[in-house]
Image (cartoon, rainbow, N blue to C red):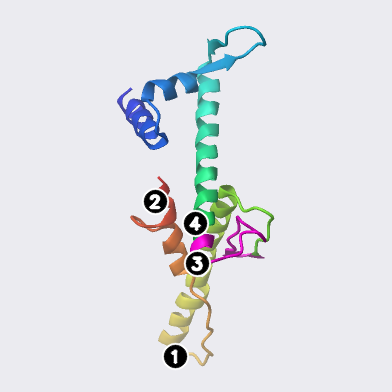
Amino acid sequence: DGASSGALNAAAQMLGVSASKLQHALVHRVREIAGEAPVASPNNQEQSQHLRDATSKSVYSKLFDWLVTRINMTLDVDSASNPIFIGILDIFGFEIMKKNSFEQLCINFANEVLQQQFNQHIFVLEQRIYENEGLDWSVISFRDNQALIDLIGKRPRGLLPICE
């Protein structure tokens, strides 16, 4: 259909391959047997969808690794000690992993959004209620993570919208 061919053309252009080659790669599997010519056989719809999803995940993962490397180069981080690392505080504290993945970024980002909702409700709104009711209370300070949420998710220049 039109939407699928538009997505295929856009993906092919970004990957630097022809749309027909990308489509063939997604809907066929090639078997190579020693001493014989490669044999292409069609995938069923479910296999093609799994291949499409796996390809997307791999591309996002490689893009994420590239982006972390570029950020670390810009920040002059010692790439020998840990070439692919960005620490993002989430509601459970820092995630320390040998290699951060795109999936971990998504998990941490979701946690940051949840933490922001919690902070907004507990700290901002509750304190506003106390203030409006004239209650005697002490201001509770907290670190606002909105800048991080915007950096990763805000349209049009957040990390995730740019990757779309």
Quarter of image, res 2: top left
Earlier in the chain: of badge 3 and badge 2, it is 3
The first of marks 1 and 4 along the sequence is 4
- Work out how far the residue at label 1 is from the one at label 4, CA to CA, in angstroms: 51 Å
Separation of disc 3 and disc 1 at Cα? 26 Å
The location of residue 156, given as percent across then percent down, is 33, 55
Residue sitting at 54 percent across and 11 percent down? 41
Badge 3 amino acid: Gln
Rendered position, 21 above or below 154: above
- What residue did someone put label 4 on? 70
Marks 3 and 1: which is nearer the front?
3
The disc, 3 or 4, on the residue closer to the chain's N-terminal end is 4
* Residue of label 1: 134
The answer to if 49 sits in the magenta stretch is no
Residue identified by numbered label 3 = 116
The CA distance from mark 3 to mark 4 is 28 Å
User: Of the residues tagged 3 and 2, which is closer to the observer?
Assistant: 2
Q: Is residue 54 visible?
A: yes
Expressed as whole percent of the image width and height from the top left, the position of residue 73 reads 52, 61
Q: Amino acid at mark 4?
A: Arg
Which residue is denoted by mark 2 in the rendering? 161
